[in-house]
Image: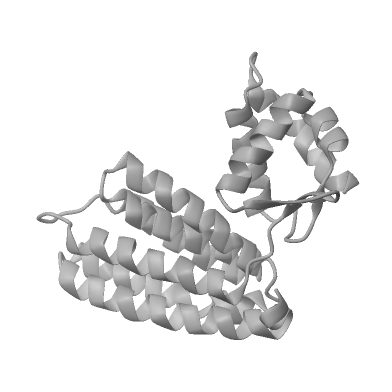
Amino acid sequence: MAEQLTGLADDRALLGRTSTAERVSDILRSRIAEGYFPPGTRLSEDSIGGALGVSRNTLRESFRLLTHERLLVHELNRGVFVRVLTVEDVEDIYRTRSLVECAVVRGLGEPPYALDGLAEAVEDGRRSAGEGDWKSVGTANIHFHRELVALAGSERTDELMRSVFAELRLAFHVVDDPRRLHEPYIARNAEILDTLRAGERETAARLLAVYLDDSLKRVVEVYLRRVGDEA
């Protein structure tokens, strides 16, 4: 926990002059997504509040917001913990992803599309794979899908999927073989990017639907190996 708290202390500058619960939530959400606080970790009010320099009330409000987003869970007489997803949670996350992401791609207008963000994510994934940094490959993959959703130009959709992707990262952090989980999708992300560059949105949507179905099966397989039905 000491290492995580040191990182949080570095984040104090992000709070600016007014320490709001929303800003604290943004910091904690990012740290949870990055794996600083793995699933099942108990979050200490005193330690985190001290590291960020915020009041207990502000921190409790941020915990409440993140609990509403399904990232934290409050256990009576025990405290607040980073949530451990069930297999049913993972399946529901992917159901939401399929509904939203495929609809975004099918709903694109006439090409050309603004694909620089997608291209950057693909290159980040390739570079991280070359370095053997599979955690960063997972981050690049999430970045790819965030950029895909952003093509809709909808702040509401972006906000919805920000929460969904943050939940997905909780599952990724439990997986014991990130290379096996993430490596196949480096090439598949590039294939979707190339298809969109060619202006073939219906083909891209079909590729994406199969991609997400395959990804769900792979995530559930490796997830069950770690947490089983008692997650």
Judged from this view, the residue extending furthest toward the right is 2
Q: Position of residue 162 (x, y in %)?
A: 47, 49
The answer, for residue 45, to whether it is visible in the render is yes
Judged from this view, the residue extending furthest toward the front is 76
Tell me where residue 204 sits by quadrant.
Answer: bottom left
Along the horizontal axis of the image, is 145 left or right of 174? left
Query: Residue at point 58% right, 53% down?
Result: 70
Q: Nearer the viewer, residue 224 or 184?
A: 224
The answer, for residue 36, to whether it is visible in the render is no
Q: Vertical placement of 16 versus 123: above or below?
A: above
Q: Position of residue 30 (x, y in %)?
A: 62, 45
Q: Nearer the viewer, residue 111 or 97?
A: 97
Q: Position of residue 210 (x, y in %)?
A: 34, 81
Along the horizontal axis of the image, is 113 left or right of 98? left
- Where's the C terminus, which quadrant? bottom right
Judged from this view, the residue extending furthest toward the top is 17
Tell me where residue 200 sits by quadrant.
Answer: bottom left
Along the horizontal axis of the image, is 56 left or right of 147? right
Q: Vertical placement of 85 versus 54: above or below?
A: below
Q: Vertical placement of 96 versus 175: above or below?
A: above
Query: Residue at point 54% right, 71% down?
Result: 90
Query: Residue at point 68% right, 58% down?
Result: 83
